[in-house]
Image (cartoon, rainbow, N blue to C red):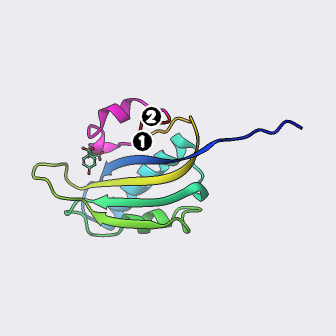
Amino acid sequence: MEEICVEWQVRGIRGATTASENSVAAIREAVRELLDELEAKNDINPDLIISATFSATRDLDAVFPAAIARERPHWCNVPLLDVQQMHVEGALERCIRFLIHVNWPAHTEIYHPYLRGAQNLRPDRNLAVAVAGEN
Ligand SMILES: O=C(O)C(=O)C[C@]1(C(=O)O)C=C[C@@H](O)C=C1
């Protein structure tokens, strides 16, 4: 029988969005939408996620984004962390970002979701998917 060998790589996936206000409901809605998009566009298997770090700008403190992520099916065992985004004067407000490391089949495209007010943070990533080795 022919053996099909899949080459795996550790890859980083970035994403960001904004919450409409500093409330549990608004942050939950924004994080769910962002992770829905991540999973839908990447056909991601949460069991292959190595870790996920969320940052929130200093104007968001109603709830931890990691706690929202942990509510998702199969995310309860993912190592999660929240940090406060460094503040730069004039930077996008009420912004939630993530950096996720994942085991990924080599040479497979990754989609980095940038939604809502965060759409223009990385127009290069928003328009195109990143090809293996380019991120
Ligand atoms: O990708 C983002 O979320 C950005 O805001 C862009 C950027 C960057 O310049 O690369 C800036 C600040 C963040 O800490 C991460 C990345």
Amino acid under disc 2: Ala
Q: CA distance from mark 2 to mark 1?
A: 8 Å
- Find the magenta span and give its range: 112-131
**Closer to the N terminus: mark 2 or mark 1?**
1
Which residue is labeled 1 in the image? 112
Q: Which mark is residue 88?
A: none
Q: Which quadrant of the structure image shows residue 22?
A: bottom left
Residue at (35, 42) in percent of width and height: 114
Q: Quadrant of the N terminus?
A: top right
Whether disc 2's CB lies below 8 Å from ligand 1 is answered: no
Furthest-right residue in view? 1
Assess disc 1: are there few (<14), some (14-19) or many (≥20) residues with their C-alpha within 10 Å of its C-alpha.
many
Residue at (52, 59) in percent of width and height: 50
Q: Secondary structure at mark 1?
A: loop
Amino acid under disc 1: His
**Dots 2, 1 in contact, CB < 8 A:** yes
Residue 60 falls within the magenta-colored stretch: no
Q: Is residue 63 left or right of residue 38?
A: left
